[in-house]
Image (cartoon, rainbow, N blue to C red):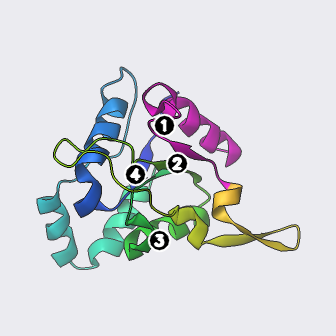
Amino acid sequence: MARRVFFSFHYSRDVRRIVQVRNSWVVRPGDEASPFYDKAEFEEVKRRAGGIEKWIETQLAGTSVTVVLFGKETYDRPWVRHEIKRSYELGKGILAIDIHNVKDPQLGADSQGKNPLSYWSAERNGANVSFDQIYKTYDWVHDNGYANMPTWIEAAATAAGR
């Protein structure tokens, strides 16, 4: 089954890695993904009434899974944190994919960053449990994301009851 997916990521540092991951998803027959915005469009979004927060809500609407693509600096990005929080509040399936080993055509591989899911936690059986313990995290290169991302997305959707 095709899933509508919201991709959360740090644009300026990781865009060339993101394009590789996202293109692997959209070129498959029958797969579906949220629109991919280039920086020029994203800058325009920031200037509109309601700005980024309104844009995020629009992008999350109709999706069943949020895929957090993270690199070296993603953990500290406030809008990535917001997207994770809203995805949780909306009951979306969530998963994280470490992309630091994806080779940027200009810069090569990067240093590993902290998983942004570890910023948030939720109460489970009377204990505060970090999102990175609740939701699955994969490494794009080592876990063969090209072949396995559709399965990861479907598993996240199923876990969220979607």
Residue 146 seen in the current view: yes
Q: Name the residue under label 1.
A: 3
Q: How far apart are marks 4 and 2 (CA)?
A: 9 Å
Tell me the magenta residue range: 135-162
Q: Distance between the residues labelled 4 and 1?
A: 12 Å
Residue sitting at 37 percent across and 40 percent down? 33
Q: How crowded is mark 3: few (under 14 residues within 10 Å), some or many (20 or more)?
A: many
- Total labels: the figure holds 4
Amino acid residing under circle 4: Phe
Report the disc number at residue 65: 2
Instruction: Specify which label sits upstream in the sequence, 3 or 4.
Output: 4
Q: How far apart are marks 3 and 4 (CA)?
A: 13 Å
Q: Name the residue under label 4.
A: 7
Q: Do the residues labelled 2 and 3 touch (CB within 8 Å)?
A: no
Q: Is mark 2 on a helix, strand or loop?
A: strand
Picture coordinates of residue 89 (x, y %)? 60, 67
Q: In this view, does 141 lie to the left or right of 34?
A: right
Picture coordinates of residue 14 (x, y %)? 28, 55
Toward the viewer: 25 or 5? 25
Amino acid residing under circle 1: Arg
Q: In which quarter of the image is the C terminus?
A: top right
